[in-house]
Image (cartoon, grey):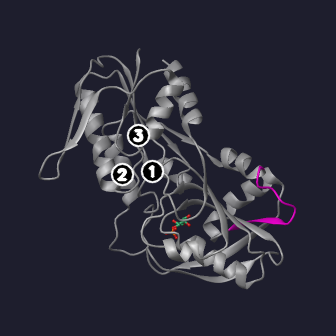
Amino acid sequence: MILTLFAGRGNHPLAHAVAARLGITPGRCVLEYFPDGEIHTEIQQEIQGHDVYLIQPTGPPAADHLLQLLLLADACLRAGAGRLTGVIPYFGYARQDRRTHGGEPVGARLMADLLSSRLQRIVTVDLHNPAIEGFFTIPLEHLSAVPLLAEALRAERAADQVIVAPDLGAAKLARQYGEYLNLPVAYVDKVRHSGHEVSVRSVIGEIEGRSPILVDDMISTGGTIISATEALLEKGCRPQIIVAASHTLLAGSVGPRLSGLPVRKILSTDSVPPPCGLVPMKIVSLDQMLAATIIRLHGED
Ligand code: R5P
C-alpha cells in the first residue's frame, strides 16, 4: 500500500514536519469554507487502495477541527482509501469523559463514536484520561509525550526542584515525572468551580524553599497553573517556576495574570500550534514520534 498523508487545518506546521520526516509531501486536498460557514473539502489526487493518515488535532476551535477531520475522512473513504488512520495529537472534548450533573452529555464518548464511524484507527497523544480508549470501537495508539518533556526538563535541572501536580488528577503524571527526573513530588488540592474558575484547598508535600516544576496533561485557560503557582508562592516556594504540559492551548484571556507570575518557562509539545508571547516557551516537537508511529503502523499490513 502507498502511504499518503493529508493535513487538516488544525496544525499545518506539525503535519508538514511529520511528512518531511517520512520523506513525502502532504497530499493535495482543498479545505475551505463556503460563504455560509460550511466546510468544503475535496481530495485532489488518486488514493485508491492507499494507506492514508489524516493529521488533525481537535484543539480550538474544536468543533471546526473535528468536522474538518470527519469530512476529510469521509472524502478519503469515498475516494477508495485502503486504510484510514486519524492522527490526532490533541484530542479535544477529552475532559468531558463523565457526567458531573445529570443534564450533561458524555462529550468524549460522542466524539469517539463520530470518529469511529469514519476512521479505522486513531493515533493520539496523552489523552486527558487514558480510559477514554475504551470509548472507541476501533484500535487506538495512545502515545506519551512525557519522556520527551522529561528529557527537555533535564536541561533545566537544579538541585532544589520539586515536581508538583497542580491538581489531584495529575498525581500519577507527577509521580511519572518524579521518577524520570529523580525528584520529590508534591500535590495541590484544586477545586474547579467552572470552566474559568478554580481555587486551591491545600498543598501536600515539601515545597518551602524549593523550585517547583508544575506538570499537567494540558493547559487550557491557564487557571489551574495560575492558582497552583499562587498557592505555592504563598507556601514559600522559590519564585523560579517551570511548567511542563503535553498540550498548551492557553485559550481565553489569562495572559496578563500569567505573565505577572514568576513562571520562568512553559515546556510543551506542538500538538496544537503553540501560543506566543505570554511566557517564554520551549516547544518539543512531536514530529519524530508521530512519524515513527506512522512508519510502524504502515509496516503492519
Ligand atoms: C484538568 O483536570 C486538567 O488536567 C487540567 O488541569 C485542566 O484542564 C487545565 O485547565 P485550565 O488551564 O483551564 O485550568
* Residue count near mark 3 (Cα–Cα under 10 Å), binned few <14, some 14–19, many ≥20: some
| Residue at the spot 71% in from the left edge and 78% down from the top edge | 232
Question: Closer to the N terminus: mark 3 or mark 1?
Answer: 3
Q: CA distance from mark 1 to mark 2?
A: 9 Å
| Residue at the spot 38% in from the left edge and 33% down from the top edge | 120
Report helix, strand or loop for mark 1.
loop
Q: Is mark 3 within 8 Å of ligand 1?
A: no
User: Is residue 83 shown left or right of residue 160?
Assistant: left
Viewer-side label of 3, 1 = 3
User: Is residue 203 shown left or right of residue 294?
Assistant: right
Q: CA distance from mark 2 to mark 3?
A: 22 Å
Identify which amino acid the numbered label 3 is placed on. Answer: His
Q: Which residue, given by chain and number where applicable, does mark 1 sit on?
A: 91
Report helix, strand or loop for mark 3.
helix
| Segment colored magenta | 155-165
Quadrant occupied by the N terminus: top left
Q: Which residue, given by chain and number where applicable, does mark 2 sit on?
A: 111
* Residue count near mark 1 (Cα–Cα under 10 Å), binned few <14, some 14–19, many ≥20: many
Q: Quadrant of residue 4?
A: top left
Question: Closer to the N terminus: mark 1 or mark 2?
Answer: 1
Question: Is residue 200 depicted above or below 83 in this figure?
Answer: below
Identify which amino acid the numbered label 1 is placed on. Answer: Phe
Question: Closer to the N terminus: mark 2 or mark 3?
Answer: 3
| Residue at the spot 34% in from the left edge and 43% down from the top edge | 9
- The magenta stretch spans residue 163: yes
Would residue 137 be visible to someone looking at this image? no
Identify which amino acid the numbered label 2 is placed on. Answer: Met
Q: Quadrant of residue 102?
A: bottom left
Report helix, strand or loop for mark 2.
helix
